[in-house]
Image (cartoon, rainbow, N blue to C red):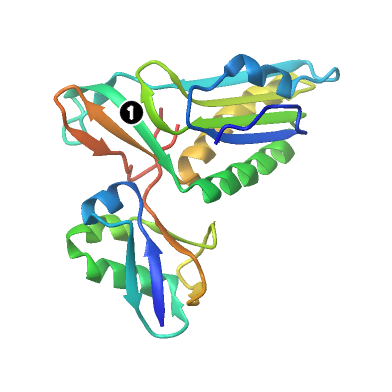
Amino acid sequence: MTVVVHLFAGLRDATRRDRIVIETDDHVTAADLIASVAREIPAAADLVHACRLAVDDAYVGGDHVVTADCRCDLIPPVSGG
Amino acid sequence: MNRSLGHSGPLHVDLTDGPIDVPALLPLIADPDVGAHAWFIGVTRRTTSSPDDPEQKLRTATLHYEAQRTMALSELESLGRDAIGRFALTALVMVHRLGRVPIGEACVVVGCSSPHRADSLDALPWVMAALKRSVPIWKQESYEDGQTQWVHPARPETS
């Protein structure tokens, strides 16, 4: 299946794109999806591995199963305030 | 987004692209049965420690904030509901500014009220720590030497 992962802040600037398209097996877990993104953009792999995945506007754990119709956001460490 | 302000119940959260109108927020936590109003106003600071050398001080010219807006609002609402229950707050307001914020201006405002002062005073640091831990908002510092840097702390910031 195809999963679109949205990128933000330093991760977006480091990759010069606001989303990345990942081709993956059906029912991929959040942890595996993050690992796939890191392989796609090795120059930013450290920051990718520091990110949390959000699915449909909520953080999910590494074992959460992602489906193709989800909105996926890769959330770098936050720095509000 | 800028929304008109009114007394919208015990919890009010907002993201705004312009200056935060603090006086307009004051009535939102008013209630005849509270004995304490407590406010925290976070402002943009000029001097920052270098991430490479904490002894080296960098001078920030301006800051820029961005958010995943829908999730930031839902995270603010979630932590706000948690705080109201945890500290028995009568009302809670959280507003974060996005976009360019000049040095010395408010970037985040949190206000709360409760029957007794201890609950409001205890709630403020808890809310700020939770905000810095989970709300998808990021700041980019632009230094006086022309360099810019996104702040992605390994651990939640302490100030």
Q: Residue furthest bottom?
A: A25
Is A9 rendered above or below residue A43?
above
The image position of residue B23, as x and y in percent, is 62, 14
**Which residue is located at x 57 percent, y 44 percent?**
B73
Is A37 rendered above or below residue A51?
below
Left/right of residue B61 with respect to residue B27 in the rendered view: left
Observer-nearest of B146 and B53:
B146
Question: The residue tagged with tag 1: helix, strand or loop?
Answer: strand
Subunit under mark 1: B
- In terms of image quadrants, where is residue A6? bottom left
The image position of residue B89, as x and y in percent, is 74, 30
**Which residue is located at x 56 percent, y 30 percent?**
B95
The image position of residue B24, as x and y in percent, is 64, 18
**Which residue is located at x 51 percent, y 74 percent?**
A69
Q: Amino acid at mark 1?
A: Leu
For label 1, the crowd category at 10 Å Cα-Cα, with few meaning under 14, some 14 to 19 and many 20 or more, is: many
Quarter occupied by the N terminus of chain B: top right
The image position of residue A7, as x and y in percent, is 35, 56
**Which residue is located at x 48 percent, y 26 percent?**
B18
Observer-nearest of B11 and B87:
B11
Left/right of residue A25 with respect to residue B143 in the rendered view: right
- In terms of image quadrants, where is residue A1? bottom left
Observer-nearest of B154 and B78:
B78
Q: Number of numbered discs present?
A: 1
Quarter occupied by the C terminus of chain B: top left
According to the image, label 1 marks what residue? B63
Observer-nearest of B142 and B121:
B142
Q: Residue furthest left?
A: B145
Q: Residue furthest right?
A: B33
Left/right of residue A30 with respect to residue B110 in the rendered view: left
- In terms of image quadrants, where is residue A73? bottom left
